[in-house]
Image (spheres, rainbow, N blue to C red):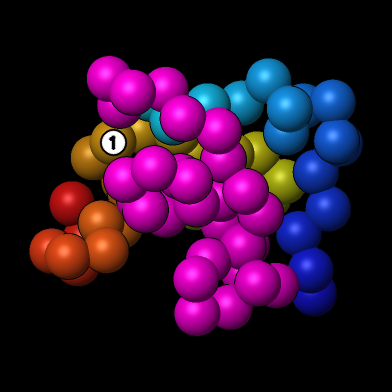
């Protein structure tokens, strides 16, 4: 099932890392994943029960696996 966040919410969410880049729905490998991906650093943040979990310690980094 594809992630369906409110477009207004998605437009204000940003990566919690220092660059605060926008997030996009899905992951690089699965555009329908229950996740948000940072457009700059590539971290993947889970979405649990429709709520984005924007904690750096819960993110998956593209080069190091779980972080």
Residue 57 appears left or right of 5: left
> Which secondary structure class fits the magenta region best?
loop
Local secondary structure at mark 1: helix
> Does residue 22 show up magenta in the picture?
yes
Taking depth in this image into account, of 52 and 29 the one nearest to the observer is: 29
Residue at x 50% of width, y 71% of height: 28
The residue range painted magenta reads 17-44
Residue at x 62% of width, y 62% of height: 26
Residue 33 appears left or right of 41: right
- Residue 24 drawn at (x, y percent): 62, 48
Residue 27 appears left or right of 31: left
Eyeballing the image, is 36 above or below 28?
above
Mark 1 burial class by Cα count in 10 Å: few <14, some 14-19, many 20+: some
Eyeballing the image, is 28 above or below 55?
below
Q: Where does the N terminus fall, quadrant-wise?
A: bottom right
Residue 46 appears left or right of 17: right
Residue at x 18% of width, y 51% of height: 67
- Residue 47 drawn at (x, y percent): 59, 50
Res. 10 image quadrant: top right
Taking depth in this image into account, of 34 and 10 the one nearest to the observer is: 10
Res. 7 image quadrant: top right
- Residue 22 drawn at (x, y percent): 55, 33
Instruction: Return the residue found at the far front.
Output: 40
Instruction: Return the residue found at the far left.
Output: 64
Give the number of marks.
1
Inspect this view and state whether residue 47 appears: no
Inspect this view and state whether residue 11 appears: yes
Residue at x 23% of width, y 40% of height: 57
Say which residue label 1 marks: 56
> Does residue 40 show up magenta in the picture?
yes
- Residue 60 drawn at (x, y percent): 30, 57
């Amino acid at each position: 099932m594809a992630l369906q966040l409110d477009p207004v919410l998605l437009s204000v969410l940003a990566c919690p890392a220092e660059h605060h880049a926008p997030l996009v729905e899905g992951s690089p490998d699965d555009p329908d994943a229950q996740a948000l991906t940072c457009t700059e650093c590539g971290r993947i943040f889970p979405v649990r029960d429709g709520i984005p979990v924007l904690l750096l310690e819960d993110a998956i980094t593209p080069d190091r696996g779980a972080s």
